[in-house]
Amino acid sequence: MTKRVGVEVSIAAAEAVGMADVDVVSAYPITPQTHIVEHLSEMVADGHLDAEFIPVESEHSAMSVACGSSATGARTFTCTSSQGLAVMNEVVFLAASLRLPIVMALANRSLSGPLSIWNDHSDVMSIRDCGAIQIFTENGQDVFDHMIYAFKVAENPKVSLPFIVNLDGFLLTHVIEPIEYWDKEWVKQFLPELEPVNRLHPDKAITMGALGMPNIFTEAKRAHEQALLDAKSVVLDTWKEMGDITGRYYHPVEEYKTEGAETLFLTLGSFGEIASLTVDELQEQGESVGLLKLRLWRPFPQEELLEAVKGAKQVIVIDRAVTFGGVGGPVAAEIRSALYHMEESPVITNYICGLAGRDVTRKDFAKMYEMSKSRENDSVKQSEYVFYGVRE
Amino acid sequence: MIEIRLHGRGGQGAVTSAELLAIAAINKGKYAQAFPSFGPERRGAPVTAFLRIDDDPIRTRAEIYNPDVVLVLDPSILRLVNVAAGIKEDGVIVANSKYSGSELQNELKIGNGFASVNATKIAMEELGLPITNTTMIGALLKTRQFVTVDDMVDPFNDRFGRIAEKNLKTLKRAYEETNFAERNDSA
């Protein structure tokens, strides 16, 4: 029996990790990820979850322990935010390079400074190129489903890569909302035992993390890149498989009322739901506007994106991080690059907003639409971007 | 959709009130969302929490700017924070105060419907602590019945365990003692 529960999203995320029967949890608490770690710690301490909870002295150690445990073939989970991710940074890249199927929840929070505990996407953008699978989630149900899903994809022998599930700090982590907990039988049916491709074992010695001399380093990187690209088919197939069980089907680029729309918003994470309200309102007023929600961030869903924007004249990309001195926000730069070779590529308009938890309401999305509309036919350069709502 | 903004001080349980009401509504098959005003939690500092209840899935995650109901857990907040900010014309304020709703309307120059109950006194007498979260749920449910008092039993049992019964009694007493003043445009 599935169970509809009113629960904080962080607690539900921890429960889902528990349902996935994780073997090792290694994490250091940091706002706004804290409740996930605390709850997992309680589940282990209370005997509800048969796992090792390893409290560590820093996030660097958290990911190092996760690497060690995953390398021995244990199902491994960690989670962090912001400065924690920054401390963990070097080991995140190693985990991916070692092809370790660690699952990490990243409760997105801005990177300091100024010191801030609130939500944006500057943390995840700092590890964009780490070589792990990375997705964004939109609501609590989405988070719950993907905490189980992530293990299945990461551990698939064709993949064997870390899987990072992004969830917006506070906007998701601290909200009580209705979430359907999976039936235990669903988990059994969906998630097999972990069969690691390689493992550290005294009886069969192997080396992991050896020095990569110049004569092999490029090949190692190329192989890693191919592994991540190849992971996409597993990502898609596994979404289908999960949907056949839960009835909820996920896609790399989620489309909302995009049919014939001239202008498309493009959002990541929990902003999708808010933007969808604006799309409803604008369509009622006769505006030709729809919404794309980029769920799969790495590997980047190039084909699906091209298909989704076909026929659109403008894409309004919402960025929640700054690429200092670059050409717009990190998502817009990527989208613009991805669409460059289209025969009739849409104008990319880029707003950087919602930094460090500044509230972005449906009225703000409507205002961004208005601002973009008036710019549609003028000589605005495609590389322009706007810090929305900034006080100059 | 009903939108409720809760004002209290850190430690009084404004967030807990929002959570328990959301869970009660979700248990009834409704959609609900409860969240704190995000930030460092400090005991004694003014805090805000938010609650939405609807028959359909809730898509917004923005803060609540135009509440239907404002719940005030601490009497001192009434003079510290503009609790009526953005409140709808038919919106109501439910406050912990020893003054009546109509006295508060006149004193604070707020025309909206105004309910009040001396929640601190009730909480001290019933629980021995000035924690007014469960008390103010009683006052809220007297004013707006989006869930019933009985709907609170399960969430209270899950949250409070052996002191659930005491909290339920507190809620019921506050429910009985809450007074309400209709909208008064001359206030």
Image (tube, coloured by chain):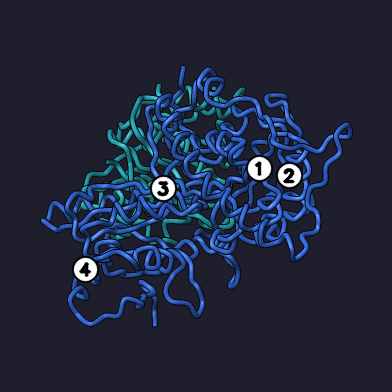
Residue lying farthest front?
Answer: A215
Picture quadrant where residue A205 is located: top right
Labels 3, 1: front one: 1
Mark 1 or 2, nearer chain start: 2
Same-chain status of marks 3 and 1: no
In the picture, one chain is cyan; tell me its letter.
Answer: B
Cβ atoms under marks 1 and 2 closer than 8 Å: yes
Q: Distance between the residues labelled 3 and 1?
A: 35 Å
Query: Which residue appears at 50% of the width and 36% of the height?
Result: A144
Q: In which quarter of the image is the C terminus of chain A?
A: bottom left
The local secondary structure at tag 1 comes to loop
Q: Indicate the position of residue A340 as horizontal and vertical percent values.
A: 35, 68
Which residue lies under the disc numbered 3? B50
Cβ atoms under marks 3 and 4 closer than 8 Å: no
Query: Which residue appears at 35% of the width and 26% of the height?
Result: B29
Q: Indicate the position of residue A212 as horizontal and vertical percent values.
A: 76, 60
Which residue lies under the disc numbered 4? A370
How many C-alpha atoms fall within 10 Å of the one at disc 1: few (<14), some, or many (≥20)? many
In the picture, one chain is blue; tell me its letter.
Answer: A
Q: Indicate the position of residue A26 as horizontal and vertical percent values.
A: 73, 43
